[in-house]
Image: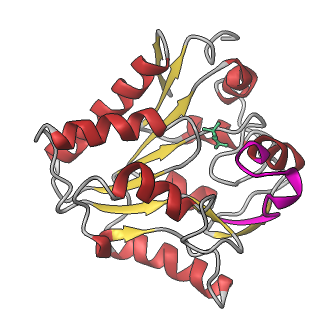
Amino acid sequence: MVKVYVMDNYEGLSNKAASIIASQITLKENSVLGFSTGSTPEGMYSRLVQMYRQGLLDFNKVVTFNLDEYVGLSPDHPQSYHYFMHQHLFNHVNVPPENINIPLGTAENLEEHCRAYDKKIAAVGGIDLQVLGIGVNGHIGFNEPDRCLSAWTCVVDLSEATIKANSRFFNSEDEVPRQAITMGMASILHARRLMLLASGKSKARAIRETLSGKVSTQVPASFLQLHPNAIIVMDKEAASLL
Ligand code: PGA
């Protein structure tokens, strides 16, 4: 059963999500955290930075794995997820750089890089808490709706809906990379806890389908229903069709 928290607004969602991460770190200082990017977790990251500055949090033993990265964008590209994570979190807290793992979109051998990524997650004992966003089409990571989904970290083609949605960060739709590396469905579902964040009306339909009671590859987020310890933290607008 997916546990749902409906918060009044985006600020409430961000505070709730940050407090769940904070308690995970407090309970286990060497937690392995799975992070995601996009607009939705920005408030959560800024709250975590604030807590760190107040001396309430220590990331010194934390290990992180990011969900995905665009193929072809180097880590210093302003739209890369490397850049996003450093700008919003890693430049401001004390996660040791060697503990930070983000797929490399410019890796020479992408397939090998993907295989090594899952192996590295397993080698540190698996992810304790994985943060997820959700696409308007129900994707998680870049696992796009399809007839079948990939189990492990791999290179995928972005759907038209995702290219459109993400074009807001680029000068034009043409500049949005067409491929990404993403953790696969098994990579995600192996995490001990999942926390999906959803904000705004545009996510309401995807959230309704995620919690519909049916699991479909056409709504990758619906696989959360198979996980024993998944929660969704959303605002009222994202919950408006429930
Ligand atoms: P968003 O992206 O937070 O920018 O809406 C989420 C996603 O597409 O997974």
Q: Nearer the viewer, residue 195 or 169?
A: 169
Instruction: Indicate whether 183 appears above or below 124.
Output: above
x and y percentages locating residue 35 in the rendered image: 45, 52
x and y percentages locating residue 176 in the rendered image: 79, 58
Residue at point 80% right, 47% down?
Answer: 145
x and y percentages locating residue 123 in the rendered image: 35, 76
Q: Nearer the viewer, residue 122 or 37?
A: 37
Residue at point 73% right, 23% down?
Answer: 202
Residue at point 65% right, 90% down?
Answer: 108
Residue 168 in magenta stretch? yes
Instruction: Indicate whether 169 appears above or below 41.
Output: below
Instruction: Indicate whether 59 appears above or below 96.
Output: above
Give the farthest residue toward the bottom.
Answer: 108
Question: How many numbered callouts?
Answer: 0
**40 to the left or right of 218:** left
Which quarter of the rendering shows the C terminus? top right
User: Which corner quadrant of the figure contains ligand 1?
Assistant: top right
Q: Nearer the viewer, residue 130 or 80?
A: 80
Residues drawn in magenta? 167-181
Residue 83 in magenta stretch? no
Is residue 23 in view from this perspective? Answer: no
Quarter of the image holding residue 127? Answer: bottom left
Quarter of the image holding residue 98? Answer: bottom left
Residue at point 24% right, 43% down?
Answer: 24
x and y percentages locating residue 81 in the rendered image: 56, 59
